Image (cartoon, rainbow, N blue to C red):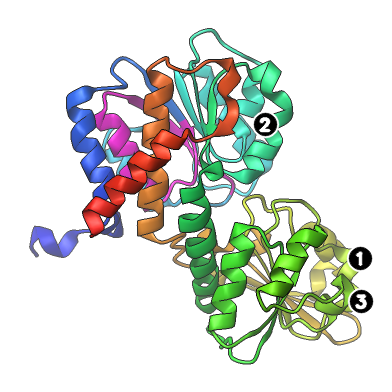
Amino acid sequence: MTRQDQLSRIEWVANSCPLLKTIAEEFSQTQPFRGLTIGTAIHLEPKTVALLLTLRAGGASLVVTGNLNSTQPETVEYLERHQIDVIGGKTTDAAAHSGFIDALLDRKPDLLLDNGGDLFGRVADRPYKNLLGGTEETTSGRRRLAPMRVAIGLPVLVINDSPIKQFAENRHAVGQSLFESYMRFTNRSTNGKRVTVFGYGACGKGTAACFRHAYSAVSVVDTDPVTALEAHLDGFSTPLRRDAITSADLIITVTGFADVITAADLPLFKDGVILMNGGHFPTEIDVDDIKAVVGATRIDRYAADGIETLHLEDGRKIHILGGGHMANLAGARPLGNSVESMDLGFALQARCLERVAGGQLDHTSCVVPVPADIDAKVASAYLDLNR
């Protein structure tokens, strides 16, 4: 067997990230992270490897951990083979994950790359002297960290507040990957299905559009009347919440908030409804609450496929995908967002960490959007590579 026959998906992804490759080549010369340790708490999957190796090309030492339920064992093995220090493994146990975060911060990294606010949220309570600042990937993390700005007191650039991240990854890639994930989990068609999307931010826009393009009848629920009006003018039905739930064959949550769907909604569910979460935290659908009402003896588990079927006393069935975790990184063969979108998003990460490491920012840049000049630089580089 030749070397070419043995390449993995990690190499496929790495070779599909030309923007990160270009940045890695530059960083190998400029060494913006020489002498610094970068700690990361982000989904450990193949695209993350491309980012981590780019940071290491810039001279960084790395200590990494994952997020709840998204760490892929093959990725951990690959990182460890390449002498990158990995703390913990795949877990759905919040207490275990919290321990991984503590263990990472015990190493006192100079820069932090956060995803959901797990790292900087802890730093607000236990600061340490050599920390320069870092980045936060998500809207969920930004919401969590914004009230802690004074306690953190360091530059933290929010990648999700970049317009590039909003349209390239959240609108286009999340929509595509949630559609792909529905098909991967269920192998069922979307044609003629009634799909209710909770949340019409960038992720909700892309999700609603992808399912509409797949011949589904899509409705949108958003608590903000202005956003709901936007969905209406975009051509989606915007029924009242109760009506949207009772008619749905598939319910997708992409809000960034907890308890969007709970056991209180059980009387409203259509027989055979499928529940799927696309938000970062596994709290948008309160799966534990729903299961507690249904009872453990009334659940069929298709473990290999990541599907649970709950049987209600009146004969209705409810299907939950991925245990309510972020569907595009849950279940069998989780692929996440498209490589191209992550090449762009992780290029923003690399450039923002470079900016923080350079000492050009202070506490006034705590939990703020990506600087406009970095957006322009990344966009221009991507266009130059793809014209």
Q: The residue under label 1 is which amino acid type?
A: Ala
Q: Is residue 52 magenta?
A: yes
Can you tell which mark lies on residue 384?
Answer: none
- Dot 1: what SS? helix
Q: In this rendered view, identify the residue nearer to me: 370 or 108.
A: 370
Q: On the image, which quarter does residue 285 sit in?
A: bottom right
Q: Is residue 308 above or below residue 225?
A: below
Q: Which residues are magenta?
A: 40-68
Can you tell which mark lies on residue 145?
Answer: 2
N-terminal-most mark, 3 or 2: 2
In screen coordinates, is 299 left or right of 89?
right
Q: Quick one: which residue is furthest to the left in this view?
A: 2
The spot of residue 167 in percent (x, y) is 50, 57
Crowding at mark 2 (Cα within 10 Å: few <14, some 14-19, many 20+) = many
Q: The residue under label 2 is which amino acid type?
A: Leu
In screen coordinates, is 369 left or right of 312?
left
Q: The C terminus is located in which quarter?
A: bottom left
Q: Is residue 196 above or below residue 373?
A: below
Can you tell which mark lies on residue 264?
Answer: 1
Can you tell which mark lies on residue 267?
Answer: 3
Q: Distance from label 3 to label 1 (Cα)?
A: 7 Å
Q: Distance from label 3 to label 2 (Cα)?
A: 36 Å
Q: Distance from label 1 to label 2 (Cα)?
A: 30 Å
Say which residue appears at 56% left-offset and 67% top-offset. Answer: 206
Say which residue appears at 57% left-offset and 47% top-offset. Answer: 91
Q: The N terminus is located in which quarter?
A: bottom left
- Dot 3: what SS? helix
Q: In this rendered view, identify the residue nearer to me: 159 or 285.
A: 159
- Dot 2: what SS? helix
Crowding at mark 1 (Cα within 10 Å: few <14, some 14-19, many 20+) = few
